[in-house]
Amino acid sequence: MRVWACLAIILANFIAQVPYFLHLYARTQAFLIDLRSFLIMGAVFAFFLAGVLLFLQRRVSGFWLLNSFLLIEFLFYLFSTVHSVLNGFPLFFQVANPDLILRAVYSIGYLNLFASGYCLFVLIQKRTALFPSLA
């Protein structure tokens, strides 16, 4: 059950990227840039979805794929947060952003930091119960 809550937060993050992108970056004059961004995000989502679907089928490859996605996501948000702090910004400073869209998306991103780390921890901790072959 705990893993499902984490995966739901990660899915919410993907959904939140749409208004974030449209708000900050979408330009009708730069179709190829917008297409490239869409393809990159689609590839990341496919990576996540493949891991989840294979994991649900109880395949060991799904376990490793999902864990690799969670590790990359956790490290991305961790390094982003550390980088902001090292550059003089307060911890989680974007939750005070006056722009409602940015505040919401960054808040979901901060939740992703904790959700991906926690989900990764739980899956690794329970790996032998989930997949006895990993003992």
Image (tube, grey):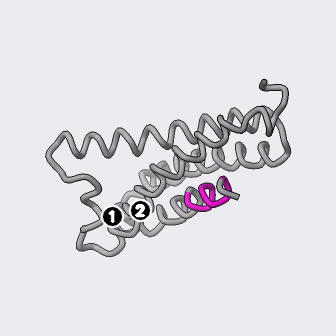
Hey, which quadrant is residue 104 in on the image? bottom left
Helix, strand or loop at mark 2: helix
Name which residue lies at 35% across and 61% down: 25
Magenta range = 3-9
- The disc label shown at residue 109, or none: none
Q: Amino acid at mark 1?
A: Leu
Q: Residue at x 29, y 56 (%)?
A: 92
- State the image coordinates of residue 97 (x, y, percent, origin top left): 25, 68
From this view, report whether residue 32 is shown above or below residue 65.
below
**What secondary structure is marked by label 1?**
helix
Q: Are marks 1 and 2 in contact (CB under 8 Å)?
A: yes
Q: Is residue 3 left or right of residue 93?
A: right
The quarter of the picture where residue 26 lies is bottom left
- Quadrant of the image occupied by residue 94: bottom left
Location of residue 128 in the rendering, given as x and y in whole percent from the top left corner: 77, 32
Asked if residue 56 lies left or right of residue 122, the reply is right
Give how far across and how far down residue 76 sits, in percent. 42, 41
Magenta region includes residue 56: no
Q: Nearer the viewer, residue 1 or 54?
A: 1
Residue at point 56% right, 56% down? 10
Q: Which residue is mark 1?
A: 24
Q: Is residue 106 left or right of residue 69?
A: left
Our reading of the magenta stretch's main secondary structure is helix
Residue 110 position, x and y percent, is 40, 56
Q: Where does the N terminus fall, quadrant-wise?
A: bottom right
Q: Is residue 130 left or right of residue 48?
A: right
Please identify the quadrant where the C terminus is shown: top right
Residue where numbered disc 2 is placed: 21
